[in-house]
Amino acid sequence: RIRLLSADAARRRYSNNVQARTFFGNPCAQRNGSSNRLSRKVNAAGANFNVEQRNPNAPHQILCLAGSLGTASTDFSVQLDDGGLDRAAASSSDSAADPQFGLVAIDPRGLAGSSFSSSGKVLTREYPSDFYLQDAFDGAAVMSALGYDKYSVMGWSDGANA
């Protein structure tokens, strides 16, 4: 049996565990020393989403959708960190290392930093039969709220199905 906890409940339950504090907290704000990486909250589709960006002013953005229990920081930390894309490109012919690309990764509705509605109500991650569709709509709403009307989409695990 799997029991899902809200981010607040998880913080309380695992507050003495350093790894859980890093996962459920906002590690990006602590280790982000770069002007290329930005953490912010974006109000879209009735929720306040935690958004992690790299190269936010790049002409082409890539929306990164996390897996069902993942977050922007857990599933895309290598790509978001400075040099992450550059290191990946050095070992392949990946053109995403080009500074013309930016990344926008969001915490899914009800997880980690996206645990509150626009009205302040606590959200929990739910998995109805159409949760992939909900994640896709949430990603599109966040991109619209950020002012991006044209972008590519990349997903990890369940995020690739959205």
Image: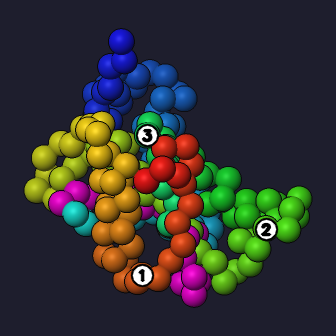
Q: Residue 151, image x and y in percent?
A: 50, 77
The reply to whether residue 151 is in sight is yes
Q: Quadrant of residue 112?
A: top left
Write the residue at 21% across / 43% down. 123
Q: Position of residue 114 (x, y in %)?
A: 32, 50
Residue drawn at x 31%, y 62% as measured from the top left: 137
Question: In terms of sequence position, does the residue under pointer 1 or pointer 2 come before the other?
Answer: 2
Q: Which residue is mark 2?
A: 94
Q: CA distance from mark 3 to mark 2?
A: 26 Å
**Residue 15 falls inside the magenta stretch:** no
Q: Nearer the viewer, residue 150 or 85?
A: 150
Chief SS of the magenta region: strand
Boundaries of the magenta span: 46-62
Which residue, as the protein is rendered here, is positioned at the far right?
A: 91
Of the image marks 1 and 3, the number of the one nearer the N terminus: 3
Instruction: Identify the disc placed on residue 68.
Output: 3
